[in-house]
DNA sequence: AGAGGGAACTTTCCGCTGGTAAGATTACAG
DNA sequence: CTGTAATCTTACCAGCGGAAAGTTCCCTCT
């Protein structure tokens, strides 16, 4: 922060994680280097290494921060029968707006597998997602609820991942959230305003019931 | 292969790609090194670098091989109204059985973006997937078909990716293809509106207890 | 056959990387 | 005010990807 850097940084953890996000956004996760992150933070490369144990520890902390951020955003939407769709859109938006975090979150080969903070943050986000499905899909949760939960997660995760990989058609990017909503609607049609109560999470087939 | 290695390897390309798959399976993509691949192939590290241009070129070739393998597997299932589900299961199975290829295929930051062989292989696989959706759309493909295609791809891609990341419940791994089929059925119920194959998603419980 | 040219591979070297060990600086408790 | 622990630096190491130049071999042309 200040021009004359004191020997002790003061908030190295925050500075390093922010620098890591910056570096990933600029050069990609594959080219992320501890030394570059340290340079951006104004310290030598052994400072973050010592603080986080090693590079893996730093990425574990970044993934933990990501799961916490995701859980915070999911919490902003109160669970309800109509909010599964919005939870899905939130998931996609989070992935796109926090690309660096998101890419690290689902690369367990870059994590310290024994890190408890990571596991806690991941569980918190996972519970929020599962709860959104339970609240939306059925009047009463049944044996299909877990399948529906995996399906919902898979759909939005796949959509986000494919978009980040540049694999989806370019037109989608013009209204990414709208596209995400359209895709999610295929799996979980919202509670219909005309009174047609959805008895199961999916009653749309491609080009079938879709009146277009 | 033989004890007395000739100066010219003879089939370096194949040997290197196979060694790369082996190395990724053993140590993960993040720790893949050109020198290790070269060692496994019995050459110096500059041999694959020269053959493929650089490390990125090697991974581009690996991704291309992956898309070709995927397209081959998808081609094995003739497109039909009931085969979208099987195409999805094939996608998931491919990802799990060819983890190394799959991980490289969707990491464009590791590819040479100007490689035409990669683009061709990717398009071939993409067309086969899209065609499976079109063939399943009844009665006729409509404006929703592209959305359905993205949704189908997202669902199976997300399922495969999450499983590879170890993010899905462990029980799913016991019958991964069955679980994939159950999940895919939620998005595309095989029953046509007109009559046959009256299988319901509610019958497709993976056998696990209800979740909440 | 045998010579030339080019492809395949090696040798050598470079700067950069992550990790370790030991030393310097600072905060803080007693 | 003193000792100790935490924080960060300096110095060093082996391994990495890539560039440049040299060596070996294949293959065609005469």
Image (tube, coloured by chain):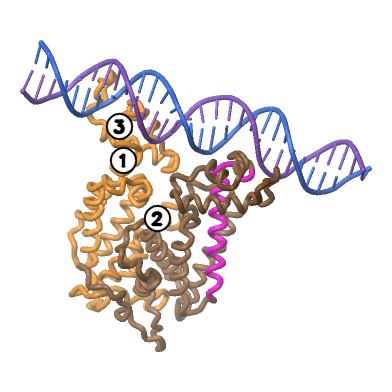
Chain colours: A orange, B brown, C purple, D blue
- Mark 2 or mark 1, whichever is nearer to me: 1
Which mark, by number, is residue A161? 2
Residue B145 visible in the shown view: yes
Q: Secondary structure at mark 2?
A: helix
Question: Tag count in the figure?
Answer: 3
Which mark, by number, is residue A194? none
Q: Position of residue B206 (x, y in %)?
A: 31, 74
Q: Position of residue B185 (x, y in %)?
A: 37, 75
- Mark 3 or mark 2, whichever is nearer to me: 3
On screen, residue B149 above or below A57: below
Q: Residues within 10 Å of mark 3 (few under 14, many from 20)?
A: few
User: Pointer 1: what residue?
Assistant: A57
Output the chain of dot 2.
A
Main SS of residues in magenta:
helix
Do marks 3 and 2 both belong to one polypeptide chain?
yes
Q: CA distance from mark 3 to mark 1?
A: 10 Å
On screen, residue B66 above or below A99: below
Q: Is residue C12 left or right of residue B74?
A: right
Q: Residues within 10 Å of mark 2 (few under 14, many from 20)?
A: many
User: Pointer 3: what residue?
Assistant: A50
Q: Secondary structure at mark 3?
A: helix
Residue drawn at x 34%, y 57% as measured from the top left: B166
Which range of residues does the magenta coloring cover?
A: B51-77
Q: Position of residue B49 (x, y in %)?
A: 60, 41
Q: Residue furthest front?
A: B3
Queried whether the magenta region covers residue B186, the answer comes back as no
Residue drawn at x 49%, y 72% as measured from the top left: B132
């Amino acid at each position: 922060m200040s021009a004359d850097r004191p020997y002790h940084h003061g908030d190295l953890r925050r500075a390093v994680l922010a620098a890591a996000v910056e570096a990933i956004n600029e050069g990609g996760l594959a080219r992320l280097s501890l030394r570059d992150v340290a340079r951006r933070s104004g310290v030598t490369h052994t400072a973050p290494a010592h603080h986080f144990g090693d590079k893996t520890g730093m990425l574990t902390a970044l993934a933990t921060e990501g799961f916490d951020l995701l859980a915070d955003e999911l919490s902003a939407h109160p669970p309800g029968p109509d909010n599964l769709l919005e939870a899905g859109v939130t998931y996609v938006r989070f992935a796109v707006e926090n690309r660096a975090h998101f890419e690290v979150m689902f690369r367990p080969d870059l994590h310290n597998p024994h890190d408890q903070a990571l596991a806690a943050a991941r569980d918190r986000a996972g519970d929020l997602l599962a709860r959104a499905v339970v609240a939306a899909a059925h009047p009463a949760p049944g044996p299909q609820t877990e399948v529906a939960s995996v399906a919902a997660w898979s759909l939005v995760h796949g959509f986000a991942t494919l978009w980040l990989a540049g694999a989806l058609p370019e037109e989608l990017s013009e209204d990414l959230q709208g596209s995400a909503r359209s895709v999610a609607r295929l799996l979980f049609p919202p509670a219909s305003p005309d009174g047609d109560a959805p008895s199961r999470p999916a009653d749309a087939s491609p080009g079938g019931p879709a009146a277009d």
